[in-house]
Amino acid sequence: MFTGILIEKDEQGYRAAVKEIDESVLPEGDVTINVSHSTINYKDALAITGAGPVVRKFPMVPGVDLVGTVEHSESDKFNVGDQVLLNGFGVGEGHCGGLAEKARLKSEWLIPLPKAFSPQQAMAIGTAGYTAMLCVIALEKNGVTPDKGEILVTGANGGVGSFSIALLAKLGYNVVASTGRVDQAEYLTKLGATSIIDRNTLSEPGRPLAKERWAGVIDSVGSHTLVNACASTKYGGVVAACGLAQGMDFPATVAPFILRGITLAGIDSVMRPIEDRLEAWQRLGEVLDPTVFDDISTVIGLNEVVSTAEALMAGTVRGRVVVKVGSTG
């Protein structure tokens, strides 16, 4: 038996709670891990609260991220005692995830814990920071350099937004943060944003083409916000889309793409090839200032996960939430 968050759905309804979980609940995999830390991402909050149809089988341990130590391995890639990191691959949706003291996973989903980070720091980054780095890489590979102009970051107070600002600022970009919580301007400025705009300026239906402003965009919001961001991106600019906090719809026209030649780069973090993951984590180690972790992240225990997921869905959580799962690490 081990302790973790268990999501159940039956005739009594949908519920998530801290429980003692029998090891028989764990699915097949060639590596068993003692989990030290996990996180609560937006997808985890959807799963825990039942606000979105994230979980595909029950019972389920949520948690799309984890760091831990290998307890048992049938893989030649990892040995007992290795520290490993997981982001995505459908874990926490169809395969039990990181918000429990044990996890059993496929070795091809894992990478070694980067030497640049402690377990807690790696989970402060988590899928959010790793996704932010993938977005930054997409801008770079499409020729968006700091001299090209302002970069818009939407959903700025969230995990992806917070890390996007910190990464872009460290790389010398001029970052404009869009947020629904303008009272958090001091936090965003400390991360490196040079100016703050209210998300309401982007979240309503707008024109097919607006005045050119952004050299690049990192958007975790979707819907009208993404449409308006595209409409005001400069000629040849790049929009990296990685989230859908406002919605999955994209009520746009082709005008920005064929009249201004902008690129809409879709950023998937869940099924990303291992090579891309290793590149992103290496860059994170090179770029991130260690002092950013205190500003961006807070640490909680398993007993606070459900209430924190509810707060995240209500939009009252800032930055990243690290969950200390195990008794060590």
Image: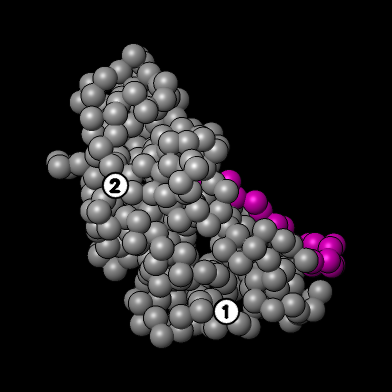
Residue 180: x %, y % from top left? 51, 79
Above or below residue 329? Residue 239 is: below
Residue drawn at x 39%, y 81% is 184
Q: Is residue 90 magenta?
A: no
Mark nearest the camera among 1 and 2 is: 2
Residue for badge 1: 199
In the depicted view, which residue is nearer to us: 104 or 68?
104
Q: Quadrant of the C terminus?
A: top left
Residue drawn at x 28%, y 42% is 19
Seen from this angle, which residue lies furthest left?
328
Residue 120: x %, y % from top left? 25, 50
The disc, 1 or 2, on the residue closer to the chain's N-terminal end is: 2
In the depicted view, which residue is nearer to us: 73 or 312?
312
Cα separation, mark 1 vs mark 2, equals: 36 Å
Residue for badge 2: 18
Amino acid type, residue under disc 2 in the picture = Val
User: Left or right: where does residue 83 sit relative to residue 9?
Assistant: left
In the depicted view, which residue is nearer to us: 28 or 144?
28
Residue drawn at x 40%, y 72% is 316
Q: Is mark 2 on a helix, strand or loop?
A: strand
Q: Is residue 262 magenta?
A: yes
Range shown magenta: 252-269
- Whether residue 247 is visible: yes
Q: In which quarter of the image is the N terminus?
A: top left
Residue drawn at x 38%, y 32% is 111
